[in-house]
Amino acid sequence: MLKEFKEFAIKGNVIDMAVGIIIGAAFGSIVNSVVSDVIMPPIGLLLGKVDFGNLFLVLKEGKIAAPYVSLASAKAAGAVTLNYGLFINTVINFTIVAFSVFILIKNINRLKKKGSISSCFSGARNKRLSLLPVCHICKGSALPSLYL
């Protein structure tokens, strides 16, 4: 069973997936920083110096009575809050990530339609001494090859 797991874990797909997850997590951190540090401050400034991280509604006061200056002070007082400012930040994060994935998939699909360099030799693959197959991308002749 350990041997089977080792074979599974060593396969390229699992390693590629792990790399994708790690890069995705790093990308998520970058998007969080872009939203929190670059996008939201100017929007907040345009809306009258609003800090979206501190937009909340007190549902139940804590040990110390309201008003609370910030979300952190409300949490410290034990107040129950509805954090709609953080929700707005999260929606913007999601929108950026979703748009980035959309652009990525769109470009991958565009490349699939065009094909790639390796597909130029698809007619020659697994044939010995192929006689100049025609490339479906460039409509020219591909180079003859031995087991591409």
Image: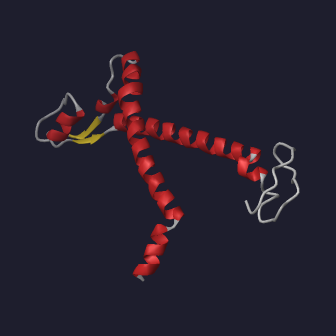
Is residue 125 rendered to the left or right of residue 103? right
Residue at 30% x, 34% y: name it.
Answer: 56
Q: How is the image coloured?
A: secondary structure
Residue 146 or 76: which is nearer the viewer? 146
Residue at 56% x, 43% y: name it.
Answer: 101
Quadrant of residue 64 within the rendered picture: top left
The C terminus lies in which quarter of the figure? bottom right
Residue 81 appears anywhere in the view: yes
| Residue extending furthest toward the bottom | 1
Is residue 61 rendered to the left or right of residue 38? left
The image shows residue 28 at horizontal and vertical percentages of 41, 43
Residue at 32% x, 18% y: name it.
Answer: 49
The image shows residue 16 at horizontal and vertical percentages of 50, 57
Quadrant of residue 85 within the rendered picture: top left
Residue 116 appears anywhere in the view: no
Residue at 45% x, 35% y: name it.
Answer: 92
The image shows residue 102 at horizontal and vertical percentages of 60, 42
Is residue 101 rendered to the left or right of residue 112? left
> 48 above or below 146?
above
